[in-house]
Structures are given as C-alpha cells and as structure tokens.
Amino acid sequence: MIFKYIQKPNLKALFRSRDSLIYLNRSIDQMGWRLPPRTKPLWWLYYIWSLMVVVFVFIFIPYGLIMTGVKEFKNFTTTDLFTYVQVPVNTNASIMKGIIVLFMRGRFSKAQKMMDLMDVRCTKMEEKIQVHRSAALCNRVVVIYHSIYFGYLTMAVTGALVIGKTPFCLYNPLVNPVDHFYLATAIESVTMIGIILANLILDVYPIIYVVILRTHLELLRLRVKDLRSDLDKGSDQHYEELVGCVKDHKLIIEYGNTLRPMISATMFIQLLSVGLLLGLAAVSMQFYNTVMERLVSGVYTIAILSQTFPFCYVCEQLNSDCESLTSTVFHSTWIGAERRYRTTMLYFIHNVQQSILFTAGGIFPICLNTNIKMAKFAFSVVTIVNEMDLAEKLRRE
C-alpha cells in the first residue's frame, strides 16, 4: 500500500523513528546508492543498475549539457537560451552534492542505529505516538516533494510536446531531435528522471533526519520536565532518571554530529546556487511568450524554493527547541535535591546551553535569515539583466 506509512497512529502498529526513512530509502534504492552485500542472490544485477545510473546521471548529462552549449549555442532562440542556462547550474550543483553524499553515505546507517537507541527510551505510549506522527510526517514530506519535482518534469515534457522542442536541450549524439523528435524527447526525459530523483533525495534527507532529531529533543524536554515530579519515588530513582536524560542528550548530540559534515557540505552548495537559480527563473519569465512556458517556469521556481526554504525553517525551529530545552532544564525541580543530583544537574545545564546548530560549509548558519539573504541575489541577477538591457538586445538578435 503506497500510503501505508503516512497514516494516523494505530496502537497495534506504531511506527519507529527509522520508519520515517522508508519512502526516502526507496528512492535511494532506485538510484542504486545502497549496494547490497554480495551474499544476496542476483546482487550483481543491482551493481549493474548502480553503474548505469552513475554513467547516465554523472557522466552523460554533464557531457550532453556541455556539448549542447558548444554545438547549438549559436542556434539558440532567447527561450532556448534561458531554458538551457538554468539546467546546467542546477544539474552541476546536484552532481556535486550527490558525490558528497555517496562518499559519506555510511553516516546514514550510523544515524539509523542511533534512531533505534533513541526509540528504546520511548517507553510511554504518548512518546511512541509522537514518534509515529513524526515518522508519518517525514514520509508525507517525501510524497509532497515527489509531487513537486516530478510535477515539474511532467509539465516540462508536456510543454515541450506542445511547443515542438525537447524539454532540456540535452545534446544526444545518437538521436537527432529534428528527425526523431519524440524519441529524443523520451530519451531526454528518462535521463532527467535520474537527476531529478537525485535532487529530491539530496533536498529531502536533511529535513527528515532533523525532524527526527527535533522529535526526540522534544521528548527529552518532556522527560526533564517530569523529573522529581513523582513523590513516591526515592532519590536513587530520581537520580537514575536524570542520568538517563543526560545520556539521551549526549546521544542526540552525537546523532547531530554524525549528520553535520554531510548536511553542511550539501547545503553550502545549495544555498550558493539558489539565488542564481531564482534570478535566472525570474529573468526567463520576460522571454517566455506562451502560458505553458510561464507555467512551467513558475513550477520550477517552486521547486527551487523547496530546495532550501523547508530545511532552513526546520533548522530555525531546532534552535528554538534547544532554547526551550535549556530553559526547562534550568527551571526543573532540582533545587533542594541531594548533592549528587545537583552536581549532575549543573553538568547537564552546562551541556544543554550549547545549541545543536547546522552551518553551511562551516561558514554561515542554516536559518531563514540566511536563506532570505541568498535568495536576494535573484534580484541582483534581474537588475543586471535590466541595466544591461539584455532582454531587448536578445530579442533584436
């Protein structure tokens, strides 16, 4: 059942944290990025599939885009030019992010094992239901991204069929688009599915992993809030609960540190490219004449915004969660407790004051303010085009 993992909580079948990755992992498997052990039957078929995906996505598409610029640039119309310029920027950014993730993909397995350890601490039904809702939300996010990204691909192909030109101007040495338009469009569309699916994975994985982090951070905050609230428990039990909370926080920090290098590198590339992509999309609106072209460009703009804005928003909320946890720990009922409890609590207060921050390339924080600043570059691109009167010059030519 395709929507099985986005359903509401069912007490007989509650999701775990790792279930939030089911739809994402299916996409990763389709890309051939999770090689099975050679003990499994027919493992070599999957290895061949992985090799084919790498060849088409990381070699054929860049080659096709370069050769298109070399061979067809003089024949481009204004519409073709701005359709072509947008694709290499986004594609090359995706390829660089994909290479980074492929080299660091072992961190995914390590993070999933930590998810299982964090789930062990969720003993109350309310906590398990919260984990279920978080997992369902993550799977729902993947479905939404599929709708946006492949909706854009569908509209781009439809628009190409209506206009009579291939959707992405990708050079094909074997098939001439003039003589075999439908075949060339089909090959180009199937090839671009790979880069779009790769883009989807690279844009969604930070959201899902950090949403799970936020969930367990909130559950930890609720556990801290309940410390020493049960008067029937002895001092040893209260101390054990506090130590458990300290260990939970340490595990959450380790979980974040595991993902930080990968997220930092990929988001650095994405945030640098988003302003240019939005600017090119805005400029292209001035040249498109048909409603279909402008509609496709509008959906493309939504897809670009989806690459950075949701994750920047999640990171903004994560910062608020860290501040809330710090406040809860400080205001918990630890005054008047025994010495060892107070000593451990002071250690805990010191540790929680360090927020779990994600930075892009270790240079600037990933937050809404950073996303807005990068997106403002789009206005600079539009301003440059207007000041140079590039639109009228290209139209006259």
Image (cartoon, rainbow, N blue to C red):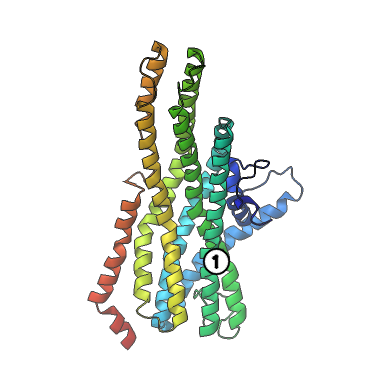
Report the front residue among 340 and 142: 340
The correct choice, above or below, for 357 with respect to 301 in the image is: above
- Residue type of the residue flagged with mark 1: Phe
Residue 46 drawn at (x, y percent)? 68, 53
- Is 280 positioned to the left or the right of 181 in the image? left
Q: Identify residue for label 1.
A: 150
Image height of 204 relative to 294, above or below: above
- Residue 378 image position (x, y, % from top left): 31, 65
What residue do we see at 57% from left, 49% from top?
136
Judged from this view, the residue extending furthest toward the right is 41
Q: Position of residue 98 (x, y in %)?
A: 50, 54
Instruction: Find the residue positioned furthest to the top.
Output: 339
> Which residue is at a point 52% across and 66% down the rendered structure image?
61
Q: Nearer the viewer, residue 331 or 355?
A: 331
Q: Is residue 348 above or below residue 340?
A: below
Secondary element under disc 1, as helix, strand or loop, is helix
Q: Position of residue 279 (x, y in %)?
A: 34, 68
In what quadrant of the picture does the C terminus appear? bottom left
Residue at the far bottom: name it.
396
